[in-house]
Amino acid sequence: MTIKKNGTEFSDDDVIRSVKSGNIKNFEVIVNRYKRRIVNFVYRMIGDYDEAQNISQEAFFQIYRKIGKYKENSTFQSFIYTVAKNITLNYLKKSKRITFFSQLSAKGEGEYIPSGDITPDEKIQKVERNKMVTRGLENLIINQRLALILKIYLGFSYKKIAEVTGWSQPKIETLISRGKVNLKNYVNLQGKGVKDV
Amino acid sequence: MFNKRENKMKCSEVNLLLSRYQDNELDNYSGEMVKEHLSDCKSCRMELGELQRISLGIAEIRDVELKENFTAEVMSMVAQHKKTRFAGRLVYIYSFVFAIFFIFGVLIDPYPAGGSSEENSKMELSSILLDGQKFTSDNNHNFVIIGLAGGNDEKGIY
């Protein structure tokens, strides 16, 4: 159940209606449609590849369990990211993680490999900046990290971020603005340190 | 927020709006004012450039690959949940039915102590008050709920 007879895709609401009426097999469509974005959203929040997969699977399971509560007049995207966000924040609260992205380089996952027509020097610079940004994310308070990932990685508008987080518009503006400045200061400080050495 | 009379913004005012400007979250008027300021101000342009580099850094974190059986594992959790829920409902129904029979079995003894079964078979219709409901039994020990117990005058109904 992905394509209609006229060639267009079934909407999320079409699929959800079918799942609600008992065709649980069609929930697979929802999983396949969102799994990549959900896993990578969670991964950017916690920085652990295996846990990101587990948390995302648990998120999809919870989405299925709560599907009866979803009302079609709200957006399904906001609904699923709200569930994924709640599970991720609970995980972070419980585990009180310290390591975060430090694991990335060890596993080679999430490491940025620049492409395109750039010189080797530019390539090194970009890789270095990417590492510093990921480490900088680790140092942000969780809400700033969440706001930046929702905005920059998922490309959500402030209104949609409000739907997912329940935050007010001014709070979102402040978190994103301060998050960017803190990240910028971190990268500049680290960059300076590297140059000085 | 900014000096409308001069129709120009100061760097400090622009700095407060720069993040929202970058995110396309300013109204048209404020957006135009920031844009105008940026065209004349090198330091604010540099500040915006830094914010853009930071955003690019976040966007460029490479996506991770999903484990091979990701979807299959989720669907197995979903199927398992459906089975468990069905089993749970069955247990609930059986428990309820068992409880009903148990209550009747304990509270309505067909062979009360001191009486023979023959005497019992001659028992007249009896009424039992239980949890605000009235039950009645006939000679064959079949029990029927006949309605909520009201006052004494209901006795006449039976």
Image (cartoon, coloured by chain):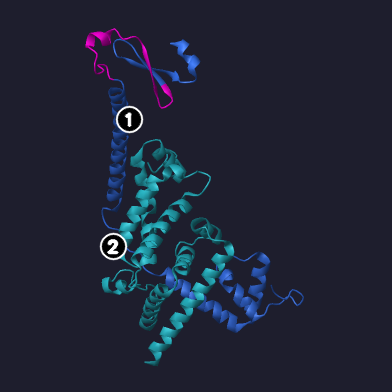
User: Where is residue A66 shown, x and y percent of the image?
Assistant: 41, 46
| Number of other residues with Cα within 10 Å of mark 1, as a class: few under 14, some 14 to 19, many 20 or more | few
User: Where is residue B152 shown, x and y percent of the image?
Assistant: 48, 17
Q: Nearer the viewer, residue A6 or B19?
A: B19
Whether residue A110 is visible here, answered yes or no, is yes
**Tag 2: amino acid:** Asp
| Number of other residues with Cα within 10 Å of mark 2, as a class: few under 14, some 14 to 19, many 20 or more | few
Chain letter of mark 2 equals A
**Tag 1: amino acid:** Phe
Q: Quadrant of residue A92?
A: bottom left
Please check the rendered image and state whether residue B132 is part of the magenta-colored stretch, yes or no. Answer: yes
Residue B41, relative to residue B103: is it above or below? below
Q: Nearer the viewer, mark 2 or mark 1?
A: 1
Which region is colored magenta?
B109-133
Instruction: Find chain A in the image and tell me its colour.
Output: cyan
Which residue is disc 1 drawn over?
B96
Q: Which mark is residue A131?
A: none
Check whether the beta carbons of the residues at disc 2 and disc 1 lie within 8 A of each other: no
User: Where is residue B45 shown, x and y percent of the image?
Assistant: 58, 79
Residue A69, relative to residue B121: is it above or below? below
Task: Give the secondary structure at mark 1.
Answer: helix
What residue is shown at x 35% (from left), y 49% (from top)?
A61
* Quadrant position of the N terminus of chain A in the picture: top left
The blue one among the chains is: B
What residue is shown at x 31% (from left), y 59% (from top)?
A53
Which residue is disc 2 drawn over?
A50
User: Where is residue B78 shown, x and y percent of the image?
Assistant: 31, 44
